[in-house]
Structure formats: structure tokens, C-alpha cells
Image (cartoon, rainbow, N blue to C red):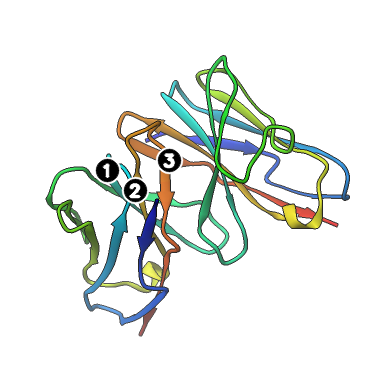
Amino acid sequence: SAVISQKPSRDICQRGTSLTIQCQVDSQVTMMFWYRQQPGQSLTLIATANQGSEATYESGFVIDKFPISRPNLTFSTLTVSNMSPEDSSIYLCSARRNDEQYFGPGTRLTVT
Amino acid sequence: GQNIDQPTEMTATEGAIVQINCTYQTSGFNGLFWYQQHAGEAPTFLSYNVLDGLEEKGRFSSFLSRSKGYSYLLLKELQMKDSASYLCAVRDNQGGKLIFGQGTELSVKP
């Protein structure tokens, strides 16, 4: 399995500000992803974090709002920019190793 | 398009067996996953099927039929701690991303 850590675990932010979430995997993985999970809902893929190049975003998510970096094979960041209350959610980092895929503990974001 | 369906909620009795079904229609297929998620926690990997048939892991088994676009997760000897949400997800064959169903909330009663 892969051990994934995220920082911060939770935060309360004011609207209009930005928050950067960090994701660290214990060893090299082939792919990394960022998901969002709203209360009582399932997981929605935001983007695939590509090492050394721009992330691949899903429909409804754009780079200006959710810039993503992946400078190496074990680390990625997701920034939630110009936040509004609608961005309140849990943000989860995920990593694929071989055929299996694992999730970090999530970052619980509340925007006031 | 992508469509993954599973029941919203199920109830079962401690010690019993429960089967959670998942049907999918996706533009590509490269494996089906089951995850368990307790409230307030991250999803935990349970199983991965890419070929037809049954995969057994202790009390949990997962079945796949690619021709029918169908999978199920079988939980035996249910325990109270099995109360959780169970998520079915399909991996596509373009980029390898996982697309999730809405999840099935399982309640295990004494």
C-alpha cells in the first residue's frame, strides 16, 4: 500500500483568500490525483497531477481556480484560489501505485 | 458518457451476509474498485477487479462481469464496524482516472 499524508488536515478561511494543500506520498507513485468530496456526497475528480507538466483538469474545474503542482514523483500541491463558501468541502489527494489506488486523509476546508 | 449506479443505502444484521451491487456504463474500462469509507475518514481500498470472476479477501469478496457491466461486493459475517459507505469506482482506459459512484451507506444492526 501507499502511505499518503496531507497538510493541513483542516482549515477555516475567509472568502476571497487562497489555501494551498500539500500531499506527500511515502514512495514513488506513477500517478497522483486530487478529488473533492462535498458533505454526504461521493468523490469528484478535480484533476490529474502530472509530474513536470500542467495538470489535466476535469470538466467544470479550471487551472485559475485550482492550480496544481507536482514537482516530483512523491509530492503535489493543490491551491484553492479566491475562495467562496461553495468551496467548502473535503479535498483528497490520491496516488496510484501499480494497479492499486490509495487516498490521503483529506483536508477539510470551511470558507466563511 | 460515464454512469455508475449503486443503491443509496442498505441495512443488514450483524453476522449476516450482504451484497452491494454496482452497475456501470463507461466509455472505457480498465478495472473496477471498491472502497470503504467511514464517516469523517478517507476511503480505504478494498478490492480491484479487472478480469471477470470472483476475488476473495477474508470476509470481503468482489465479483466482476465485464460483459454485463456489473460488479458486487459481498460482505460475510457482518460486524458492527462494517457500518460505512461503500464506494464503487471504475478506472477508465484514458489516463487511468477513477470515476466514482454515489456510494452505498450500509448500516449493520445488532
Amino acid under disc 1: Gly
User: Residue under circle 1?
Assistant: B31
Report the front residue among B100 and B48. B100
Report the Cα–Cα distance between label 3 and label 1. Answer: 15 Å
Q: Position of residue A90 (x, y in %)?
A: 63, 52
Q: Are marks 1 and 2 in contact (CB under 8 Å)?
A: yes
Q: Is residue B10 above or below residue B42?
A: below
Where A103 sits versus A29, above or below?
below
CA separation, marks 2 and 3?
Answer: 14 Å
> How far separated are the C-alphas under marks 1 and 2?
6 Å
Circle nearer the viewer, 2 or 3: 2
Residue A72 is left or right of residue B96, and the answer is right
Q: Which mark is residue B90?
A: 2
Quarter of the image for the N terminus of chain A: give it: top left
The reply to whether residue B107 is in sight is: no
- Residue at (44% x, 27% y) in the render: A31
Disc sitting over residue A43 in the figure? none
User: Helix, strand or loop at disc 2?
Assistant: strand
Q: Locate residue A11 relative to residue B38 in the image: left or right.
A: right
In this rendering, the answer to whether B48 lies above or below B62 is above
Number of numbered discs overlaid on the protein picture: 3
Instruction: Report which residue position mark 3 lands on.
Output: A102
